[in-house]
Amino acid sequence: MGKNFSIATVSLLLLLTSTNAGQVFDVKSYGAQTNGDITQALTQAWKAACAVAGSKVVISTGTYKLGLVTLLGPCKGSIEFNLQGTLQAPSDIESFKGKDGWVVFERIDNLTVSGGGVFDGQGQLAWQKNNCAKKYNCDILPINIRFNFITNSIVQDITSKDSKFFHINLLECKNLQFQHVTITAPGDSPNTDGIHMGRSSQINITNANIGTCDDCISIGDGTQDITIKQLTCGPGHGISIGSLGRYQNEQPVSGIRVIGATLSNTNNGVRIKTWPASPSGTASDIHFENVIMDNVGNPVLIDQNYCPNNQCSNELQEHYRNFFNIGSCEVCLQ
């Protein structure tokens, strides 16, 4: 009888384990309502889901307002952020209180971001205040989606729209895949880079459709083993390695492959850009294959005297590095 009890106990424990795995955390269960502010509800749902292995946070169809949030790990196991609706950022810059990101995913392993939904940065008012090309003490503008220290993860079937600054920024990420991602902003929206990455490796971008007023994809220092396939880019500034050489002790860039891309109505096609009088550094093993260009200003450009708006003083460089803290990325126009 004792043996039978032991087997029953083990079976019950296995059942409890299986029911905990794959649990769904719908933000509406935490008070979220369509057209309402779901910042608190999402924060609570994420915290609960992060404590359960194999969980999913769901934001169903509809439009929701969302303040700045940091969705922080590490989590107990894999976790999915499933956005089916549209999230709207605050339109005014003051709401961000100097923070440089709207939705921040940080220190998570095995994350999935999916669902077909939209991250709407509502950047129209912010673009009018973007004076970083001319003014030393310019306002900080937030990035739509930041991925900081994310590993072994996938981002698929989402849209980033009208970000106030960069749309998606990767900092020290490893083994991260982007599939069927759409990024869009008007052709007069300054500094709205599509995907920027710095100090990241094993990044794969497939079937992305990006049209903004800046680089569709930009690659900063310390970035290695990047594959971009079937990219549609335009309008914008094309695909950029760099800018590089702006700061001391930058890490090498290597293993960049663009295989199959169509660029239309862009200022540049594929380019490598470094600042004048750069410290020593390397960008190597870079391949651009099967790239179609239509109405592109500079199809292939290697610019070793990159200096937008004559902002090349050491003082200004250090100011921007501390000010934006986005991983050696381009922070001014062009």
Image (cartoon, grey):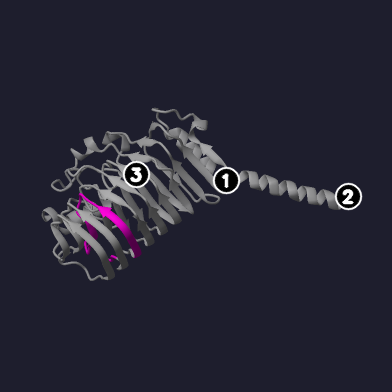
Residue type, label 3: Thr
**In the rendered structure, which segment of residues is drawn in magenta?**
225-250
Residue nearer the viewer, 135 or 33: 33
- Determine whether the residue tagged by mark 3 lies in a helix, strand or loop: strand
- Determine whether the residue tagged by mark 1 lies in a helix, strand or loop: loop
Q: Is residue 114 left or right of residue 102?
A: right
Residue nearer the viewer, 229 or 29: 229
Binning the other alpha carbons within 10 Å of mark 2 as few (below 14), some (14 to 19) or many (20 upward) gives few
Write down the quadrant of residue 66 in the picture: top left
Residue nearer the viewer, 314 or 167: 167
Going from the N terminus, do you reach mark 2 or mark 1 first? Answer: 2
Identify the mark at residue 22; answer none if there is no mark: 1
Spatial CA span between label 2 and label 1: 34 Å
Identify the mark at residue 96; answer none if there is no mark: none
The answer to whether marks 1 and 3 mark residues whose Cβ atoms lie closer than 8 Å is no
Write down the quadrant of residue 276 in the picture: bottom left
Spatial CA span between label 1 and label 3: 25 Å
| Residue under numbered circle 2 | 1
Going from the N terminus, do you reach mark 1 or mark 3 first? Answer: 1
| Residue under numbered circle 3 | 159
Q: Is residue 248 visible?
A: no
- Determine whether the residue tagged by mark 2 lies in a helix, strand or loop: loop
Binning the other alpha carbons within 10 Å of mark 1 as few (below 14), some (14 to 19) or many (20 upward) gives some
Q: Position of residue 152 (x, y in %)?
A: 46, 58
Residue type, label 2: Met
The answer to whether marks 2 and 1 mark residues whose Cβ atoms lie closer than 8 Å is no
Say which residue appears at 64% left-offset and 44% top-offset: 19
Q: Position of residue 192 (x, y in %)?
A: 24, 47
Residue type, label 1: Gly
Please determine whether, in this image, residue 39 is positioned above or below residue 316. above
Spatial CA span between label 3 and label 2: 59 Å
